Image (spheres, rainbow, N blue to C red):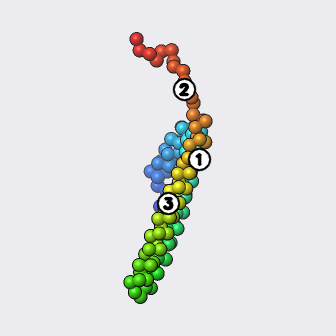
Amino acid sequence: MTESAKNPTKSENEATTAATDTMNALGPMGETAQKIWTDMGNETLRFVASRVEQDLETQKALLACTNLAEVQKIQAEFFTQALEQYRVQATRMMEMMSEAAPKGLPSLPIITSRGYDDVPL
């Protein structure tokens, strides 16, 4: 672990506190948004880590090739698999966002009436 990760600086602590205060000021909607953003960030990191691992495996397989036909076969499989994984990941992220929206909406105040003094004369 790096030294800065072990001991955050004053400005990092202030930035974290400011972000937390902002989210808390939003009330229940802020809590919901913070949880969803955290979940989406974790999911994105998981996906990226998985893709990097697969990229390295593909690179090793390409380096072991002895002819052009093997290279083309590995590349075709890699791109087909990558496109499918990105499609699945995009669908998963959209589902996470669509599930998050209804959870936060009931906590928002519904303003349907006008105030007495809001119309200028």
Q: Which quadrant of the structure image shows residue 29?
A: top right
- Of circles 2 and 1, the one toward us is 1
Badge 2 marks a residue whose secondary structure is: loop
Residue 70 shown left or right of residue 103 in the figure: left
**N-term mark: 2 or 1:** 1
Residue placed furthest toward the left: 68
Write the residue at 53% across / 55% down. 91
At 50% from the left edge and 49% from the top edge, which residue is drawn?
16
Indicate which label's residue lies in the foreground, 1 or 3: 3
Residue type pointed to by label 1: Glu
Residue 31 image position (x, y, % from top left): 58, 43
Upstream in the sequence, badge 3 or badge 2? 3
What is the CA distance from the residue labelled 3 to the residue labelled 2? 39 Å
Residue at the extreme bottom of the image, as rendered: 66
- Spatial CA distance of label 2 from label 1 is 24 Å
Q: Disc 1 and disc 3: Cα gap in Å?
A: 18 Å
Q: Which residue is mark 1?
A: 99
Q: Which residue is mark 3?
A: 87
Number of numbered discs visible in the structure rendering? 3
Please name the residue that numbered disc 2 is placed on: 111
Q: Nearer the viewer, residue 86 or 7?
A: 86
Q: From the viewer's perspective, is 9 left or right of 104?
A: left
Q: Quadrant of the C terminus?
A: top left
Q: Helix or strand or loop: what does disc 3 sit on?
A: helix
Local packing at callout 2 (Cα closer than 10 Å; few below 14, some 14-19, many 20+) is: few
Disc 1 crowd rating (10 Å Cα; few below 14, some 14-19, many 20+) is few
